[in-house]
Each structure stands twice: as C-alpha cells, then as structure tokens.
Image (tube, rainbow, N blue to C red):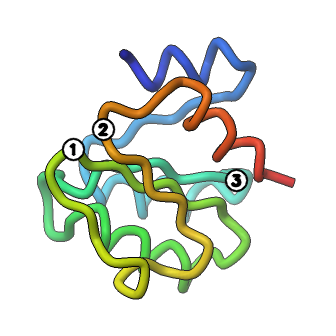
C-alpha cells in the first residue's frame, strides 16, 4: 500500500518530507498544511512521535496521524487528538483520519 497514492487518489494535495526536520521546514513555509502523517520510526533529529509534539505546539489545528507496525505508544505519550494507525492499516482508516480536516 502506498499512502501517498491513496491520499492523492482521494483528492488531497500531498507534500513529502524525507525526515522530521524537513517536515517542520515545510510547516513553516506552507501555512496551508492541514494534516501531518508520519511513521514513528524515521531518520533525522527526531522520530515521528517527537514530530507530532512539535507540530501540535506550533500548529495546533493541524490533524495528526501517526503510524507504526512495531511500536504502539500509549495515548498519554501522543499529543491530544492524534490518530494512531497500526500497520498494516486500511485505506479506509487512513482516509477516515484525513476527513477530520475542517
């Protein structure tokens, strides 16, 4: 399953970042970003969970979607209103999470 293709096929515009630092840079340069979807395990100075916290602090209204096939963080470790998808997740689960965008 290719998450980018699923999201694009559903009519959403997609920007990709190779690591959390690039994702934060995109957030700074693109105020129109409405959702961030990340795996927990990723290269760079912070993992996906840390990225979710960074985004929640800097951009509170952004929809947060976090995924992993190996790690399931307790809800108390994730920012408020973070949707967690355990891999393999369904296309429906991903799109349902994205439809929370106002």
**Closer to us: mark 3 or mark 1?**
1
Q: Is residue 63 above or below residue 68?
A: below
Q: CA distance from mark 3 to mark 2?
A: 23 Å
Q: What residue is disc 1 on?
A: 69
Query: From the viewer's perspective, is residue 33 above or below residue 55?
Result: above
Q: Earlier in the sequence, mark 2 or mark 1?
A: 1
Residue at the spot 57% in from the left edge and 57% down from the top edge: 29
Q: Please say if 40 is above or below 67.
A: below
Quarter where residue 6 is shown: top right
- Whether residues under marks 2 and 1 lie with C-beta atoms below 8 angstroms apart, the answer is yes
Q: Which residue was labeled with disc 3?
A: 34
Q: Which mark is residue 87?
A: 2
The disc, 3 or 2, on the residue closer to the chain's N-terminal end is: 3
Q: Position of residue 86 (x, y in %)?
A: 34, 46
Q: Residue at x 26, y 49 (%)?
A: 68
Gap between marks 2 and 1 measured at Cα? 4 Å
Cβ atoms at labels 3 and 1 below 8 Å apart:
no
Query: Which residue occupies the foreground of this view, 101 or 22?
Result: 101
**Image quarter in which the N terminus is found:** top left
């Amino acid at each position: 399953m290719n998450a980018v293709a699923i999201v694009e096929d559903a009519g959403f515009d997609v920007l990709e970042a190779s690591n959390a630092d690039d994702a934060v840079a995109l957030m700074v340069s693109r105020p129109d970003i409405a959702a961030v979807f990340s795996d927990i395990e990723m290269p760079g100075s912070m993992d996906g969970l840390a990225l979710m916290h960074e985004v929640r602090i800097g951009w509170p209204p952004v929809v947060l979607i976090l995924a992993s096939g190996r790690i399931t963080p307790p809800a108390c470790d994730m920012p408020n209103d973070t949707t967690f998808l355990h891999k393999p997740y369904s296309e429906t689960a991903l799109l349902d999470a994205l439809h929370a965008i106002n």
